[in-house]
Amino acid sequence: MTVQVTADSFEASDGSGYTPAPQKKAWSRQVAVDVVAALDCLLVAVGAALPAYIYGAYGELNIKPLEIAQTGLIAALIVNVCLRAWNFYDPRRIHRLPVEPPRIAIALVFAFAASLGLGLPLESYDAHMLIWYLTWLALSFVLVFGHRVIAASVLRNLAIDGRFNTRISVYGAGIIARRAADFLTNGPDGLNFVGVYDDRGTPGRVNDEGLTVMGTIDDLIAAGRRGEIDQVIIALPQSADRRVAQIARKLEQLPVSLHVVTHMASDLVDPQSSHKVSALGPLGMLDVKQNPHADWRPIAKRAEDLVLASLFLIALAPVFALIAAAIKLDSKGPVLFRQRRRGMNLSVFHVLKFRTMHVLEDGETIEQAKRDDDRTTRVGRFLRRTSLDELPQLWNVLVGEMSLVGPRPHAVAHDDTWADLLSQYVNRAQVKPGITGLAQISGARGQIGRDSDLRARVERDLEYIAQWSVLLDLNIIVKTIWAVVRGKNAH
């Protein structure tokens, strides 16, 4: 089944449908509780190190820092395991983060008992070491308990303020949507019902189920691109199976979690993929896709980009200077070429490249570069073959418009054309575009002359989005160097 996506799909709806007020960007519950867990571990280690430092500095005792650090680390990990077993780090309890002093004390005592002989050799124990253990136990308890009291208060206030709310919208305005709306409106804390969207009826109307229709699917897509929605539930009757499949295809382009009520067969959504089943109150749902930017993923991805892009820029500064001089000596025109590209959620930015042609095309019609292109300068041919013309995009990475690794951005004019040819093309915009990507190291780079070329590139890009990890990025970066040396399909 193919759903045609036209160039109009790139534009936000300007219709008369009601647009909800901008909402606060949701923070990840998992990241929040992981930060609390890390601070708990750190405070256990501080409880070990501080008394040891005082003993060493003022008690004239021979304290071995490595042994102290080893013992503190082991105890911190054991405390973490105990508290996790008691659901102290359950993201669902972020409104009421557990404090429970008795369990904190039990975890600390158990950790210290378990670390005897693991961190410090048994012959190290004497009266002073026993005093150190008791001081460590008392100080760690005070630090961890005080931290959890503060963390519980801060997270509770943030939760009340809606910072951890999962913003859910429903597509479909029938009886199933009514059940979803009732549960989300009156359900547990942390769920924020954004509203109902449907294409059948006038936006802003109240339908037979008493639901106000916020807008059409184009309005829903626009809200998703603005970052106002975390999850979308497709709630249509069983008789609308075909329509559900079409709606799911269109909504897959958004960086949100997507669910379908489970009265339908999964093969109508994607016959080549397996899907998990979940529940939201009275609703059984088929999980079509997960948000590719949830929890720690965007934080790890941004940290990776900042560190590596900074190192590359510093190391390649002399190369930048040589290339700039060669371009100026070879032909007239600017050193850098700026062209409009679409980034995450189809936001438009200007990509930077070293100028390799006599022309600076950025209009509605742009001719693809091809082998032996007479528009290419002498220096430009070398830069394009070695992909050195892409290096200025490290700046795009630093400012957050691109990533080092991701789907390659194409000229806006090409986006409009290729979106008409392949329905899944816009799904690449769920993440930031990259300087290199899985498609590039897999041979799917260079000129797109046939539909199969476009399909191969999009398939690799979507595979990358689904399987992303820091290790995958590092592997792609290393393989990119080899691909550049070969120069295959680069012109």
Image (cartoon, grey):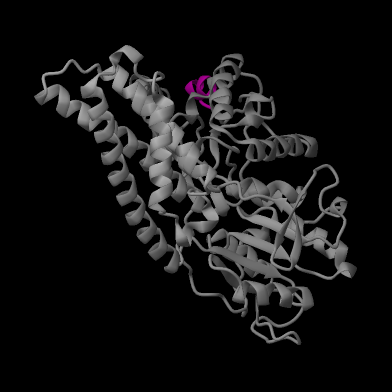
Please identify the dominant SS of the magenta region. Answer: helix
Could you say where residue 145 lies in the image, as x and y percent from the top left? Answer: 33, 49
Which portion, as a residue range, is magenta?
A: 376-384
Could you say where residue 43 lies in the image, as x and y percent from the top left? Answer: 32, 39
Instruction: Please tell me in which quadrant of the rendered image residue 440 appears.
Output: top right
Residue at x-position 61% and y-position 44%: 366
Residue 333 in view in this figure: no
Residue at x-position 49% and y-position 48%: 89
Question: In the picture shown, does residue 274 fall above or below 348?
Answer: above
491 or 144: nearer the viewer: 144
349 or 298: nearer the viewer: 298
Return the residue found at the far right: 239
392 or 123: nearer the viewer: 123
Residue 4 in view in this figure: yes
Residue at x-position 27% and y-position 40%: 138
Q: How many marks?
A: 0
Could you say where residue 180 lies in the image, as x and y percent from the top left? Answer: 70, 72
- On whether residue 82 falls in the magenta region, the answer is no
- On whether residue 383 falls in the magenta region, the answer is yes
Instruction: Please tell me in which quadrant of the rendered image residue 437 appears.
Output: top right
Can you say which quadrant of the picture contains the C terminus? top right
Return the residue found at the far top: 123
Question: In the picture shown, does residue 484 fall above or below 152?
Answer: above
Could you say where residue 384 lies in the image, as x and y percent from the top left? Answer: 54, 25
Q: Is 106 displayed left or right of 197 in the figure?
A: left
Instruction: Please tell me in which quadrant of the rendered image residue 14 appears.
Output: bottom right
Q: Is 49 displayed left or right of 102 in the figure?
A: left
